[in-house]
Amino acid sequence: MICKPTHPIVVLGAGGQLGQEICKNLQSRALPFTRLALDITNRFTVLRQLRDLPASAVINAAAYTQVDFAEVDPDICYSVNAQAIYHLVEACRLLKCPLVQLSTDFVFGGDRTRQSPYSEDDLPKPLSVYGRSKLAGEQIAATWPAHFIIRTCGLYGGLSANAEAPSFAKTMLELAENHLSLRVVADQRCTPSYVPHIAQAILKLIQTEAYGTYHITNAGSTTWYEFASTIFQRQGLGVSVIPISSADWGAAAARPHYSVLSCSKYASVCGAPLPSWELALKEYLDYRNSI
Ligand SMILES: NC(=O)C1=CN([C@@H]2O[C@H](COP(=O)(O)OP(=O)(O)OC[C@H]3O[C@@H](n4cnc5c(N)ncnc54)[C@H](OP(=O)(O)O)[C@@H]3O)[C@@H](O)[C@H]2O)C=CC1
Ligand SMILES: Cc1cn([C@H]2C[C@H](O)[C@@H](COP(=O)(O)OP(=O)(O)O[C@H]3O[C@@H](C)C(=O)[C@@H](O)[C@H]3O)O2)c(=O)[nH]c1=O
């Protein structure tokens, strides 16, 4: 069951920030489905639309990603992030092709003393409805042996409806236009990751038959406070960034204080790690400044 570099690939959630970037990389090989074209929670539609396609893989970039709203509406979050994956497993079984299921660093966080990067073998312990729903989705995807479960983190720099997708980085740059100071959490350490790098890494990995769970992020780690400060410093913006705690920010969903992912398994299968978050951020800002 090899995903040959010339064969078409189904991309679900093709209107999302990662889905769009994957389709851009695949060019004519993409068989893209936006939510409007295919609602993954509808088993009948999934099987009818996918069963006869000449697909060599199904990449599921569709998800419910509103972490705070998920706390008040867990049913819709679970139906997209978990229940729907049963339908995708069924479709991949019919198509005899691998399932590529995107997941998140938010499957971790419950270990509050953690201070070293999580490997794929570490026991997940989510803190939020979103994190638990994504973990459930992983477990369902893993019932199909030909699976790639890919955990990533803090995506930015992708497109949505042909404009830049909402992300922490974009929000910071927009807020800087009319704020002299911003309060940003300084007690969540993770690795914000640049969508073009993640999309390319996924497409490289799935050309192998090394099925399993992988962590794929840019290298290194930072806090949102440091990330925002670096953005403003690099852009020469005089915004003062005030470090605050997650409790001060007061979001509905709890976030991990530490969710850095070790990506050494990806590097050993694909030959090299991704660039550091600092280099990725430079690439993003250079691109943004050039348009
Ligand atoms: N964003 C991030 O920082 C991170 C994301 N991830 C994971 O990466 C993956 C991609 O995330 P990202 O691109 O940022 O997410 P987006 O929210 O940008 O895109 C998700 C897409 O899924 C679509 N979708 C939602 N519900 C359904 C449904 N029932 N059927 C079909 N499509 C649906 C959405 O459509 P619509 O817009 O119409 O609702 C949207 O286009 C997800 O699995 C996410 O959990 C992991 C770590 C970090
Ligand atoms: C806008 C803003 C956010 N924040 C905080 C809130 C939050 O804790 C942190 C990041 O905010 P965001 O809302 O961008 O991201 P958040 O929803 O925490 O991001 C997550 O998205 C999901 C889908 C994932 O899977 C994760 O990997 C993760 O990146 O920054 C501030 O402290 N100050 C601000 O001005």
Image (cartoon, rainbow, N blue to C red):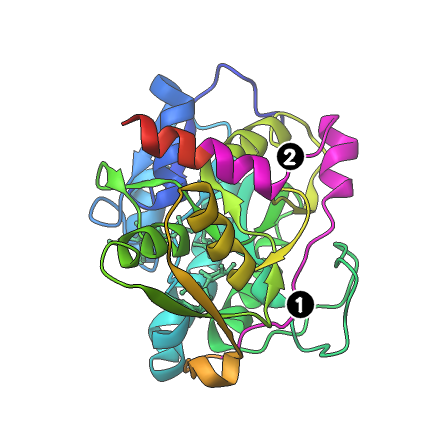
Residue 104: % across, % down: 56, 58
The residue that appears at 74% across and 34% down in the rendered structure is: 267
For the image, the number of numbered tags is 2
Range shown magenta: 254-283
Decide which of 287, 24 is in the foreground and name it.
287
Verify whether residue 270 appears in magenta. yes
For badge 2, the amino acid type reads: Leu
Earlier residue among tags 2 and 1: 1
Verify whether residue 178 appears in magenta. no
Where is 157 relative to 122, above or below?
Answer: above
Per the model, the C-alpha gap separating discs 2 and 1 is 20 Å
Q: Dividing the image into 4 quarters, which one contains the N terminus?
A: top right
Would you name the residue on which mark 2 appears? 274
The residue that appears at 75% across and 25% down in the rendered structure is: 271
Disc 2: CA contacts within 10 A as few (<14), some (14-19) or many (>=20): many
Disc 1: CA contacts within 10 A as few (<14), some (14-19) or many (>=20): many
Mark 1 residue's CB less than 8 Å from ligand 2:
no
